[in-house]
Amino acid sequence: MQKDVRFAKSHEWISPVAGGVATVGISAYAVEALTDLVFMQLPAVGRKVKAGESIGEIESVKAVSDLYAPVSGEIVEVNTALPDQLETLGKDPFGAGWIVKIRPDQPAEIDALLDRAAYEALIGSQPH
Amino acid sequence: MSESATPPLPRPTSLRETALCQWHAAHGGRMVDFAGWNMPVQYASIVDEHLATRSSVGLFDVSHMGRLSVTGPGALEWLESMLTRKVAGIVPGQFRYTLVTADAPAALEILDDALVSRDADATDGTPRMGLVVNAGNRERVVAWLRSRLPASGVELVDHTLDTAMIAVQGPSAVDVVAGLSPGGDGTRIRALVNYRGTTATVAGHAAAVSRTGYTGEDGVEVTVAAKDAVAVWEAILAAAAPLGGRPCGLGARDTLRLEAGMPLYGHELLPHSDPFALGLGLAVNLDGRTFPGCGALATMKAGKPARVRVGLDLGSKRSAREGNVVLGGPGHRPAGAEVGVVTSGSFAPTIGHAVAMALVDPAVAAEGTEVEIAIRDARQPARVVGLPFHRRPAGGGKTPVAG
């Protein structure tokens, strides 16, 4: 699964669609950049979202960051265990650190996102 | 309407660097623009740095703060005429918290909060005074003070760029610094009470050491020549590291001062603040004294403030931030009315959840009052509590450290 994930420029990753549903999380780079995560707000299941819309918040000691929907679709599941174990986001970003599952309106939207090489080039160009 | 006492100064086009800036960058410091200075906000984790300061030792580069000397036969009398806090009677080695105020044409303007000190007198007996001011206010404060200097008898020199200041904070801080000072110097450092200072040799370099800080912990601040800063910093860090000490950024300094209930200029304390409503009445001595703005301060002291500073305990992981509106709680009439505004807020690492300071209507300022804070789309319940949020254990309270 890790090999096929795509990334949004805003550091969310999204898996390929399986059974009509794709899994969304945030990159280890984003977790490392945020540091000291203390709070997470998840969206409601059943919410219809548009690509680029804020679907939640991740708060560190210093600041609040939005979590954005990488594609348009419907939120079908959220990782309710995550807010109480935010360290999972950094330790296992593609596993237990998943955030939401989304049923994309147009699965082709995923293909238009950054592949791993393009994402790594993006973060490599950012001040760390 | 009211005009500023001094004109705004042009912003620097590039960031200033303290003598320790390169050290921070080379040791993982995440460097940010803080009041025009390139400063570390953190090295790895703000929470780890915060907790190290509470349990052991944290080292903070506070060289960006302004260090001014005021010397000459008229120095003491002149400062007495300029500051809200009484300077007459201050003895060598003593520090006092004060406000620096200007009397703009129309109104009082608080330019800064500061520490005023008296060093050992010069050999000819003239007093040598010091002021430590906030980085972001230094140039305006210096310009204001210079505009009020008498024709002779007082010399004001800004030593910010030729010195460095290291805050060593935490229950083991005094031991660590005293341990680097041979013989009588170490003994004098250990004997310092709060708001007293001494000169000493620290790690082989001439230093001024004061039992002051901005974290709510015991500790000292060590001022050395800029050229000695890296050597002294590294010596203190080497002595502190086996105890769990670590370098800390300004992020931890902010969460530590928040837990300690200390106001920060630009957040709690503003140019037109009522210091009495902020709980800073002790910084204003009006008894038979004349200084810029003293009349306006006397009026404030006699009046009833519209808003007073309180602590808010959110009990949540979600933090309130500066500017969030405070609303009346369930019992408040009218329901949901705006009753104040958050001035500082964060997750508090020692406490384990979020706390905030706010300016609120006196009607909701009593401890135990339930309020709500509008945080983006959420309404976060909070309770008014006394300040500080965290108080260090009594009696010096050194936390045992394993090993």
Image: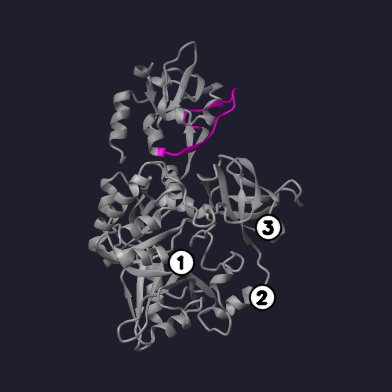
Q: What is the secondary structure assignment of the residue under circle 2?
A: helix
Q: Name the residue nearer the viewer: B55 or B13.
A: B55
**Lower position in the chain sequence, tag 2 or tag 1:** 1
| Crowd rating for badge 2 (residues with CA inside 10 Å; few <14, some 14–19, many 20+) | few
Q: What is the secondary structure assignment of the residue under circle 1?
A: loop
Mark nearer the viewer, 3 or 1: 1
- Decide: marks 3, 1 in contact (CB < 8 A)? no
Q: Which residue is mark 1?
A: B193
Residue B73 image-quadrant placement? bottom left
Quadrant for the C terminus of chain A, please. top left
Give the magenta part as a residue range.
A34-54
The numbered dot on residue B365 is 3
Which amino acid, mark 2? Answer: Ala
Q: Name the residue nearer the viewer: B401 or B64.
A: B401
On whether disc 2 and disc 1 are found on a single subunit, the reply is yes
| Crowd rating for badge 1 (residues with CA inside 10 Å; few <14, some 14–19, many 20+) | few
Q: Name the residue nearer the viewer: B225 or B29.
A: B225
Q: CA distance from mark 3 to mark 1?
A: 33 Å
On whether disc 3 and disc 1 are found on a single subunit, the reply is yes
Residue B1 visible somewhere in the drawing: no
